[in-house]
Image: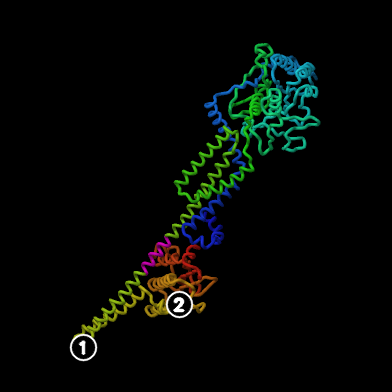
């Protein structure tokens, strides 16, 4: 945070001066400004990271399950009245398939011919063949397809870019539609989307269909739902279905947890299932092999493990047919919302107190989670929640840091103002005491001195009155020194530089120390306030007192002058010197010097002098032409 403060300091100093001088109002402005900026930057840098996308996918399963629990509690578990599943598993393959013939059609085609014929006896609405029938076509299956052509949909499995994976041309032409059967599995293994947008041959991603040669293939859920609408008069037609792009891929797997009547192929062929069960329904024929015999990777939906492809296709078809597609909230709009939310939350976090801030952000997070889940359940809108929560967390962290930083600076400023007020009151009290001593005590001492003179005349043979007069003269001199120390009137009568030079003269007179005064610019008015001049005088006075008491020096130099917009005062001696690292622990006087310097916004440091082999150099530096408050603000 210190590095950030130093980096942003030039910008802060360029804020309007009037705003900076408004106390707590100016502080509020700074908090809002930096909080908004930090929230926006955090959103831009972190809220769209791939890590958050992975977390969002993991959270999606939880959202489905919560929506399913709420939906099942309120609406109960639903059973589809439109779709029936017929599975073809390991046992069916063993019981129903004949021996394969070299260079002939696959044995499953003859099974499909018998299975479809049996199902068609029940007058189904559509029969969807979701079984791999690639290779040479069985004439009997072609005949069945042609006979029931108007209500048979053939699913194209595998890679559409490889023509060898396609069923034969005769089979493709003998059915109502051929559709692209593909499951889009997420990295976490979930299947929650279906490809409304398939990759075109030219490589474009926004093509709503897949083209190969002169044939056009649509996605299986979309093709079946459109045929259901055209045959049953219920549901969206192809023209009514919304167009999606890769950035707005819809969720075709719903959270309602629809149940389907499911029968085995053996049961249907052997007549164990009455054909009437298929009347007016969509019958999806799909495989259910074990992993040992089927190398297709296992997939799962947010509500079930190891779900067959046929059931996933049924869920997608049912979702489209009932207009319950879960739309993804547009990312372009979400980006702008995240940016606005980051700025607003960052500003909010930078001005609220810790308890209120924590409570507010926890409540905001819970409201956002609840709101997005309500939209997910009632309006079928999927709003990514992890980026929103990430923005809240980052705004909370950065806002808290800004609040603490500005609060610390405010408290330091208030402490400095309190110290200044105490110093002013102390100086006022010293001045009052000095005036009292000058106006009352000195006249009293003078009166006693005159009485001693009178006694000395009357008692010429007695030496006591003369001794009293000498003691009183010494007391008056000492009293005048004390008065001058309490309130240095020399600053007002002689000026700033003469007052400093007078301190050197007194030191040389009292301690027999050789002193020198160097004036670097021959001017006395630097635009300093009376308070600043007094504190500088006190600092120099304290420094000379320390030299007198502790340094054992015999040479002292005091220099003053302007350097690069700063007034620089140096007090140098050739004494034994001091260790600057022990100033706080060893000397109350040196600590007092540092506190006085901080009070007026001056920099103070002790170092080894250049002009002497031993000793110490006290350096004071303060910006001229700057008020005390502004000087303290730049520390």
Q: Residue furthest top?
A: 271
What residue is drawn where x is 54% and y is 53%? 34
Which residue is more in the foreground, 353 or 323? 323
Q: Which mark is residue 457?
A: 1
- Spot occupied by residue 205 in the image (x, y as percentages of width and height): 72, 37
Looking at the image, is mark 2 or mark 1 earlier in the sequence?
1
Q: Which residue is mark 2?
A: 497
Asked whether, in this view, residue 490 is left or right of residue 445, the answer is right
Quarter of image, res 449 = bottom left
- Spot occupied by residue 28 in the image (x, y as percentages of width and height): 49, 55
Q: Residues within 10 Å of mark 2 (few under 14, many from 20)?
A: some
The residues tagged by marks 2 and 1 sit, at their Cα atoms, a distance apart of 46 Å
Q: Which mark is residue 532?
A: none
Instruction: Please state the extent of the stretch shown in magenta in the rendering.
Output: 415-427
Which residue is more in the foreground, 231 or 536? 231
Residue 469 in view of the camera: yes
Quarter of image, res 179 = top right
Which residue is more in the foreground, 360 or 515? 360
Of helix, strand and loop, which one carries label 1? helix
Q: Is residue 423 magenta?
A: yes
On screen, residue 14 above or below 251: below
Prevalent SS, magenta region: helix
Quarter of image, res 85 = top right
Of helix, strand and loop, which one carries label 2? helix
On screen, residue 544 above or below 4: below
**Colouring convention used in this rendered image of the protein:** rainbow
On screen, residue 602 above or below 258: below
- Spot occupied by residue 537 in the image (x, y as percentages of width and height): 42, 73
Q: Residues within 10 Å of mark 1 (few under 14, many from 20)?
A: few
Decide: marks 2, 1 in contact (CB < 8 A)? no
Q: Residue furthest front?
A: 233
């Amino acid at each position: 945070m210190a590095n950030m403060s130093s980096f942003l300091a030039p910008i802060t100093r360029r804020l309007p001066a009037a705003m900076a001088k408004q106390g707590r109002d100016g502080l509020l402005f700074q908090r809002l400004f930096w909080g908004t900026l930090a929230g926006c930057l955090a959103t831009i840098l972190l809220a769209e990271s791939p890590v958050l996308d992975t977390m969002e996918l993991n959270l999606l399963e939880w959202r489905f399950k919560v929506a399913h629990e709420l939906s099942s509690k309120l609406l109960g578990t639903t059973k589809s009245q439109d779709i029936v599943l017929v599975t073809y598993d390991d046992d069916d393959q063993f019981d129903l398939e004949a021996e394969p013939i070299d260079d002939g059609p696959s044995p499953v085609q003859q099974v499909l011919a018998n299975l479809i014929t049996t199902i068609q006896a029940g007058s189904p609405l559509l029969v969807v063949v979701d079984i791999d029938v690639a290779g040479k076509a069985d004439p009997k299956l072609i005949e069945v397809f042609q006979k029931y052509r108007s209500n048979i949909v053939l699913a194209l499995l595998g890679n559409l870019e490889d023509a060898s994976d396609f069923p034969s041309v005769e089979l493709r032409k003998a059915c109502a539609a051929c559709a692209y059967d593909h499951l889009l599995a997420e990295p976490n293994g979930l299947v929650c989307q279906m490809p409304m947008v398939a990759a075109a041959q030219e490589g474009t991603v926004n093509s709503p269909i897949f083209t190969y040669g002169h044939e056009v293939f649509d996605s299986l859920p979309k093709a079946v739902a459109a045929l259901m609408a055209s045959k049953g008069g219920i549901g969206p037609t192809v023209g009514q279905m919304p167009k999606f792009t890769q950035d707005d891929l819809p969720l075709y797997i719903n959270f309602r947890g629809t149940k389907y009547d499911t029968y085995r192929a053996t049961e249907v062929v052997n007549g164990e299932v009455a054909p009437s069960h298929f009347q007016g329904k969509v019958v999806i024929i799909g495989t259910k092999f074990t992993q040992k015999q089927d190398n297709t990777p296992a997939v799962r939906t947010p509500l079930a493990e190891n779900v067959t492809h046929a059931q996933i296709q049924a869920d997608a078809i049912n979702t489209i047919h009932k207009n319950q597609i879960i739309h993804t909230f547009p990312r372009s709009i979400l980006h702008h919302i995240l940016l606005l939310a980051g700025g607003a939350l960052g500003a909010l976090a930078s001005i609220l107190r810790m308890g209120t801030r924590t409570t507010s952000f926890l409540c905001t997070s819970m409201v956002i989670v609840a709101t997005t889940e309500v939209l997910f359940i009632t309006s079928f809108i999927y709003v990514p929640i992890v980026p929103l929560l990430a923005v809240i967390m980052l705004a909370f962290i950065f806002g808290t840091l800004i609040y603490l930083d500005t609060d610390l600076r405010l408290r330091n400023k208030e402490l400095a103002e309190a110290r200044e007020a105490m110093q002013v009151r102390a100086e006022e009290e010293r001045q009052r005491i000095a005036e009292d001593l000058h106006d009352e005590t000195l006249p009293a001492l003078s009166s006693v001195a005159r009485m001693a003179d009178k006694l000395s005349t009357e008692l010429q043979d007695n030496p006591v009155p003369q001794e009293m007069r000498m003691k009183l003269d010494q007391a008056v001199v000492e009293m005048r020194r004390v008065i001058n120390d309490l309130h240095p009137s020399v600053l007002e009568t002689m000026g700033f530089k003469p007052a400093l030079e007078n301190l050197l003269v007194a030191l040389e007179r009292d301690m027999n120390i050789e002193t020198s005064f160097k004036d670097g610019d021959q001017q006395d008015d630097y635009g300093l306030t009376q308070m600043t001049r007094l504190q500088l005088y006190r600092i120099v006075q304290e420094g000379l007192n320390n030299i007198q008491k502790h340094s054992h020096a015999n040479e002292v130099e005091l220099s003053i002058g302007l350097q690069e917009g700063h007034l620089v005062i140096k007090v140098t001696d050739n004494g034994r010197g001091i260790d600057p690292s022990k100033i706080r622990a060893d000397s109350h006087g040196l600590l007092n010097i540092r506190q006085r310097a901080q009070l007026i916004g001056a920099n103070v440091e002790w170092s080894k002098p250049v002009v002497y082999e031993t000793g110490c150099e006290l350096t004071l530096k303060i910006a001229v032409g700057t008020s005390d408050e502004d000087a303290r603000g730049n520390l």
